[in-house]
Structure formats: C-alpha cells, structure tokens
Image: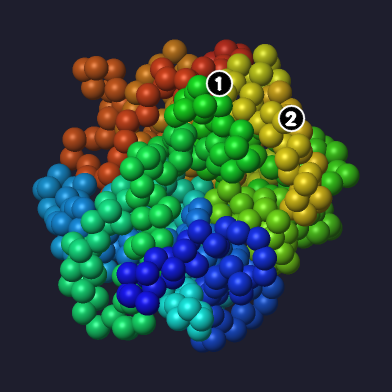
Amino acid sequence: MNRSFLVIRAALLLGTLVLGPGCDFLRGYAEGPSSTLLSWWGQHPPADARELGAARFLFDDFRSLNTDALQTNALPWKLTVAAMFTRHDGVAAPHLDGGEVAPSEEGWLTLLEQRYGFVRASAVANWPGASSPALSRNLGVISGDIRRAVPRVRFEANNHGCATCHASNLWDARGLPTHDVWLGLPSTSIDLGRYSSEVYAALQAAARDPQPVVAMLDRIYPQLDPVERGTIIDIMLPAFLHRIGGVDAPAEPVPFDNGGPGLSNAVGHIKNHFGLLNPTLGPAEIAFTQIPDVISVQVRSSLLCDGIYAPKGHAPFTPHRRDAPDRLAHAQEVGAIGTLFTVSTLGVAPKTAQENLPAVREVMAFFADADTPPFPGVVAIDAARRGLSVWTARCQACHGSIELVGQRSHVVEFPNHLSSLEEIGTDPARANAATAKLLEHLIDYPVGAAIDAAPRGGYVAPTLSGIWATAPYLHNGSVPTLWHLMHPDTRPRRFQQGGHALDFDKVGIKGFVDDDGMWRFPPDYVPWMLPAVYDATSPGRTNVGHVVPFDAMSEAEKADVLELLKTF
C-alpha cells in the first residue's frame, strides 16, 4: 500500500468521516481540553466561586477544541501560523511607519492584535483573585493538544473563548488605550470578519500548494514534535484540501458579512448553520449588532438587543433589582442562554451544547456581582447630580432607575423595556432577521429546551453599564460618541472604528470631522490595531432613531446627562 493512499485515507478519517454517523472512535473523533485552563488551575486553584467563574470565562474552551469544531470554528494553530506567513511573508503592521512582522509565533501574536484587534493584555483589572493571570497569548485565544492513538494524531488546536469578544482594553487619564483589560465589557475593536476571511484564504492556498507552507512550518517551528509535524503534513493539509481547497470552494468562509470591528452577526451564523440563509441576499444578510456587555446579566430578563431569548417559563420583559436576593440564581438562569452562543461563536454542535450549562452557570457566579470600571477622566459631579434629575424624567422608564453615590452610578431597578420599531425608530435589520422559522429550529436540540425564543419586533433598552467604555453607540454601533447620539443631526455618515482613543468631552471615539464629513482619528494618534471605516448609509448600519428623549432636552440638560453617563 503506497504512502499517498495512506495519506488520503488518514485525511478522510479526520476530515470527511468526522461528519458521519456512528460512535466517536469509529468516525475519527479526537479532542483536547484548554491547556491554559488546566495550567492556571494547577498553579492557582480557585479561591472561591467568583474566581472559578472568572477563570472559566477567561480560559475555558467550552468543549470547542475537537475535530468536530475543526469543521466550523476551531483551527490547527501551527498550520494557521505557517499558512498566514506563507501567504503574507513579512506582513505589514497597521502602524504609520509601515513596519513588517517577521514570521514567528510571537510575530503572529503581534498580528492578531494589530491587524485583527485581539488584545495583548498585561493585567485583568477586575480579576477577583489575589493576582491577575499572566497571559502569554492574546485575550481569549484558547488552545489545547488534540491527540489520538489510532490513527496516530497530535496537533495543537485553537479557538476563541468568551473573553475574545466580551472583554475590553481600558484607557488612561489622557484617554489613550492601555493593556489593562476589564472582563465583561464588549470588545469594541475585535474584527472577526477580517480575521476569518484572511485565515481562510491562507489555509485554502496552503491546501492547494502545500510545499511552501511546509517550508514555513519548519522555519517557524524547527523543533516541532515529529508526530505533530506528520499530522499537519500528512493529515491536516489533505483534510483542508478536501474541505476548502477544491476548485468550487467558496471565496469566503461564510456567505454573510460579520460587520467589522466590534460587531457581530450571530443571526447570520445560526441561519448559515441551519441552511436558512437567503441565497439571493448573499453577503447582504445584515443582522449586525454591537457585541453586548455581560456585566448587567443579573438585571436582565432576556438577552441580546432584540430580546429574542429568555429563560424557559420566565416573562421576558419584567423589572429586576440589582440587589435582589436571588440575583445569582437569576443571573445563572439568564446566563445559561449562553450555552446557545457556544454554537454560533465556538462551533459547538447544537446537540451537545447543553453539556456546557454547568460551566456557564459557574461563569455567572462571577458576573452576578460584577461592577464596571471607573471613568479615567474628571467627572463634573455637580453637573452629574443635575443630570440625575433629567435622567429620572427622560430616561428612567427605559434604562432604569439609578443611584449616584460619590462618583459612581449603579442601576437600582432595570425595567427590561421592549421598544417597538415604531417607537425607537432605529435600524430594523436585526429585529427583522430573527424569524420564527429560524427560532423553531432550536426546539429540536437540548440547548433549546431551557429557552423561550420568539421574534419581538423591536429592541430592548440596554442598562448602559460602563457606557463610556463601549463606543460606538446604538445597537448596531452606528454613532461614534454619546454627544453625537444626543445631537442626531450631527451624527457622521462615516467614521473610523477600531483601536480608538477615548474622547473625554464627547465621550466615545476621539476624532474630528474631515473635509469629507468623516469622523476621523486625530492626525497625531496611531491606533493600536488596523481600523475600518463604518458607513452609516449602508443597509443594517443606519444611524437613525432614538431621538425623542433628546428633543425634549436643552443643551444644558444634555451636557449634564453626558456627565452623569461618565459615572456609569
């Protein structure tokens, strides 16, 4: 039996048969847990439930490091690094000096940050334990060794955990970004669309012409374990050729747009999974939303901006108090909906996603009492107190009653108010995308058994937790600052997004209006990652709506409310 036949046979075991029926062993299944989580727990056993939840949030793979997930979201780490540098040997960093990153694993970590917005964190500012973890790779990058004896397989796989999207860098007293991060805030710069598109193209090229990528692999990893090297060359590359390297392979990894920095299109992911994407729309599947925070889960009665998911048997739009005695149990019930998100964001199979429920509930033990970071600039506290009176009259009914203690505000009671599209007037694309037909598919899986899912025809007002750190604004991230939000006629049609400095006055993306009317970063500011241009004139991205509260405010009242929002 010649070697080429053995290679093809092994590739089919790991590639084609991984999708077939039968027991896991016979179909070539293999998995490996997060090595980072195991290493952290081995050196720092969690002191309490909050540290356990934070560790899972930061390091857990939620059963997404396996050969099944390689068919969706997971990647072979070293093959990806070699393929990217083969396609772009000496990739330009986004800085203005036009520097290049040399092929190496450290160079790849640099590119993950500077090109795609994966933060390199120096410290977790809200870590509940005695000392913040040291992070050797970018925030949210999870990896583990996948091994199997027959056929002999070993390779490092990686995926992206919760912190990839739901943790953010902070800013210093000058408004410049730092490498300290806060768990639970949305990442406003992560560009998963650019990342997945460029990685897919590199792996596709490697599968079609493997010799250059093998040479790059040996250049970057000269001491690579022979078994892992053989797995990559003899199994992984042929498997990827079978999967994405054919002549009829699509040009992009998914047939929809993810949105750009700080945005996601989870509805597009789930529709694609269930085969419900409209083929006539193609990339026009435009259910863009800004990545949400998870700090406010203890007062939410539904999840996501359109409120389509709620715990089974619970009224989805009822008030909740921040200090309720059952806040942990409530956070765990609402947060358990996160098991569904392991399907769309991590590639976990819907039939097994419910097995993540205990781990997700442990994560919620951390967020049930989570707080927001303090504003890094000066707060005019007298103006903020005046703003509280305006808030009570104009904003409380939708965004909740708050208390202002010192220079910090907290939600007392959150109404979970659902606004119809007619009432709020914002872009309708996301609210219209989650159809009853789509949500009915969840009933057939265990992950849907604990969830009530239905179209709501509108949007749920957010809690505004840490709002000063979450620019841009509205559910689709279409307004660069809170000042622009409060002055609808000034909202820019286009603005730069990704790796921004913080504007202390307008609160949001620091910039200026150029001659073409675009809100552009200051000329002396170098963003820490490659930014994109947000076009608020395109479908799914419009910056209309949410104007009525501001029509009733004077300029002085708007300034006072803006100051109050710095305390959230």
Quick check: 292 above or below 535?
below
The image quadrant that residue 64 belongs to is bottom right
Point 36% across, 55% down: residue: 241
The image quadrant that residue 521 belongs to is top left
Residue at disc 1, secondary structure = loop
Label 2, label 1: how far apart the Cα atoms are: 20 Å
- Answer yes or no: is residue 562 visible: no
Which residue sits furthest bottom? Answer: 43
Mark 1 closeness class: few <14, some 14–19, many ≥20 residues within 10 Å: many
Q: Nearer the viewer, residue 328 or 305?
A: 305
**Where does the image place residue 392, in percent across and percent down from the top left?**
70, 29
Point 48% across, 16% down: residue: 488
Question: Dot 1 corresponds to which residue?
Answer: 427
Q: Is residue 444 left or right of residue 502?
A: right
Mark 2 closeness class: few <14, some 14–19, many ≥20 residues within 10 Å: few
Q: Nearer the viewer, residue 168 or 548?
A: 168
**Tag 1: amino acid:** Asp
Question: Dot 2 corresponds to which residue?
Answer: 436
